[in-house]
Image (cartoon, rainbow, N blue to C red):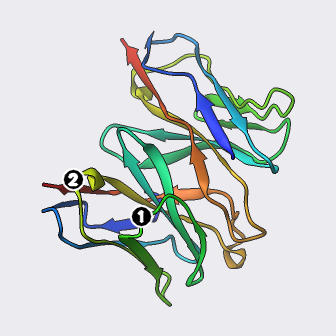
Amino acid sequence: DSGVTQTPKHLITATGQRVTLRCSPRSGDLSVYWYQQSLDQGLQFLIQYYNGEERAKGNILERFSAQQFPDLHSELNLSSLELGDSALYFCASSGSSARGGTFYEQYFGPGTRLTVT
Amino acid sequence: GDSVTQMEGPVTLSEEAFLTINCTYTATGYPSLFWYVQYPGEGLQLLLKATKADDKGSNKGFEATYRKETTSFHLEKGSVQVSDSAVYFCALSVAFYNQGGKLIFGQGTELSVKP
């Protein structure tokens, strides 16, 4: 168990809809990352938050947005869903100086499998 | 830009065989290197890491050495087991000060170990 939790585990929705994926990082971790895993694109970095602020952006579509809340949990919002958005979405977190952790090791949650029909 | 290239799979081995999965990288900075493993239906688990040149990461019988001169981080195991069957991902990260940094993954190599 990595200590990173994600909900829901599975999500089935229709095209055009909007969904929210939730992630709770390991206790004390300040950085949260979102990744998308699909058969054709592999594992792609979407976005990183550090202590509530956006730090880095990857191949994230304009229809997607994220935020990190004061309690450090994060949400990824996907809107106007298309069939091609079907994928596994992973959240990861990395350590903070308060825990003496390392900033470069990322621990992954179990993922949310999104199916758009 | 930064990138990671892994040998293509699937790789099929008999139990107790020697495993090598090749990984090479391109990076402009001084990356940390990782191997992650994904078992069927599960998330990614950190297998091992190396943060500077000539570091050797090891865990559960797996090893990989950070070779700056050949920009490689090949994964090896002396004797594989059926339970090692999984997809293995090589990855790099260039951390931004103390705030972490995104992981860039290779395409993954599927390993199947037969009894």
- Relative placement, left or right, of B11 versus B28 is left
Percent across and percent down for residue A19 are: 24, 72
Dot 2 amino acid type: Leu
C-alpha separation, residue under disc 1 versus residue under disc 2? 14 Å
Observer-nearest of B13 and A36 = A36
Percent across and percent down for residue B6 are: 58, 28
Say above or below: B43 vs B110: below
Q: Which tag, 1 or 2, sits closer to the chain's start?
A: 1
Mark 1 crowdedness (10 Å alpha carbons): few <14, some 14-19, many ≥20: few
Q: Chain of mark 2?
A: A
**Residue where numbered disc 1 is placed:** A61
Percent across and percent down for residue B37 are: 49, 39
Answer yes or no: is residue B101 visible: yes
User: Which residue is found at the position 25% from the left and 66% from the top?
Assistant: A8
Percent across and percent down for residue B79 are: 55, 16
Kindly state the secondary structure of the residue where label 1 is placed: loop
**Residue where numbered disc 2 is placed:** A83
Say above or below: B114 vs A26: above
Kindly state the secondary structure of the residue where label 2 is placed: helix
Do residues under tags 1 and 2 come within 8 Å of each other at their CB atoms? Answer: no
User: Which residue is found at the position 37% from the left and 13% from the top?
Assistant: B114
Mark 2 crowdedness (10 Å alpha carbons): few <14, some 14-19, many ≥20: few
Res. A67 image quadrant: bottom left
Dot 1 amino acid type: Leu
Answer yes or no: is residue A110 visible: no
User: Which residue is found at the position 61% from the left and 17% from the top?
Assistant: B78
- Relative placement, left or right, of A69 versus B7 is left
Quadrant in which the C terminus of chain B is drawn? top left
Observer-nearest of B111 and A84 = A84
User: Which residue is found at the position 51% from the left and 19% from the top?
Assistant: B80
Observer-nearest of B76 and B78 = B76
